[in-house]
Image: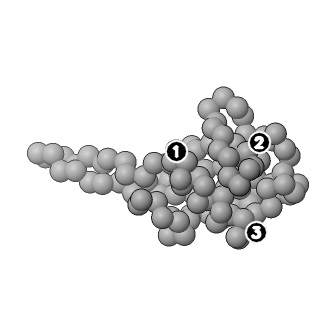
């Protein structure tokens, strides 16, 4: 099943067009990437929210620090290809799980 166009975005990396979608969950963010318009292998990764705790009077609030940006997606595509992702070949999705420590998300 392809990533749906509504709610997803596209990015071009090395003359290839990819479609991607990020989805927040309890405790982490899922990122799905695949070649746009092809039935190849999907890449799935996870990121922590990396909340920043803010003390306000008698309570603590959390401010989200991590944002999925085009640079994060580009780094994830590169990391996926180096770790067995074959976006143009059919196959089961490749789930690389949490990759926070594998890319530079603090840029």
State which mark lies toward you, 1 or 3: 3
Residue 10 visible in the picture: yes
Element under label 1? strand
Q: Which residue is mark 1?
A: 24
Element under label 3? loop
Left or right: residue 105 versus residue 33 is: left
Distance from disc 2 to disc 3, alpha carbons, whole Å, reads 19 Å
Left or right: residue 22 versus residue 55 is: right
Q: Which residue is mark 3?
A: 84
Residue at the spot 65% in from the left edge and 44% down from the top edge: 11
Quarter of the image with the C terminus in it: bottom left
State which mark lies toward you, 2 or 3: 2
Circle 1 crowding by C-alpha within 10 Å: few under 14, some 14–19, many from 20:
few
Element under label 2? loop
Distance from disc 1 to disc 2, alpha carbons, whole Å, reads 22 Å
Q: What x and y, as percent, mark residue 12? A: 68, 46
Q: Which residue is mark 2?
A: 36
Residue at the spot 26% in from the left edge and 46% down from the top edge: 61
Q: What x and y, as percent, mark residue 16? A: 75, 49
Going from N to C along the chain, the mark reached first, 1 or 2, is: 1
Distance from disc 1 to disc 3, alpha carbons, whole Å, reads 25 Å
Residue at the spot 72% in from the left edge and 65% down from the top edge: 81
């Amino acid at each position: 099943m392809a990533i749906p166009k509504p709610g997803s975005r596209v990015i071009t990396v090395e003359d290839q067009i990819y479609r991607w979608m990020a989805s927040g969950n309890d405790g982490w963010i899922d990122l799905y990437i695949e070649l746009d318009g092809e039935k190849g292998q999907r890449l799935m990764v996870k990121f922590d929210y990396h909340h920043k705790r803010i003390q306000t009077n008698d309570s603590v609030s959390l401010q989200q620090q991590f944002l999925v940006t085009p640079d994060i997606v580009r780094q994830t595509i590169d990391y996926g290809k180096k770790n067995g992702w074959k976006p143009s070949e059919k196959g089961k999705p490749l789930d690389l799980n949490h990759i926070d420590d594998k890319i530079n998300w603090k840029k």
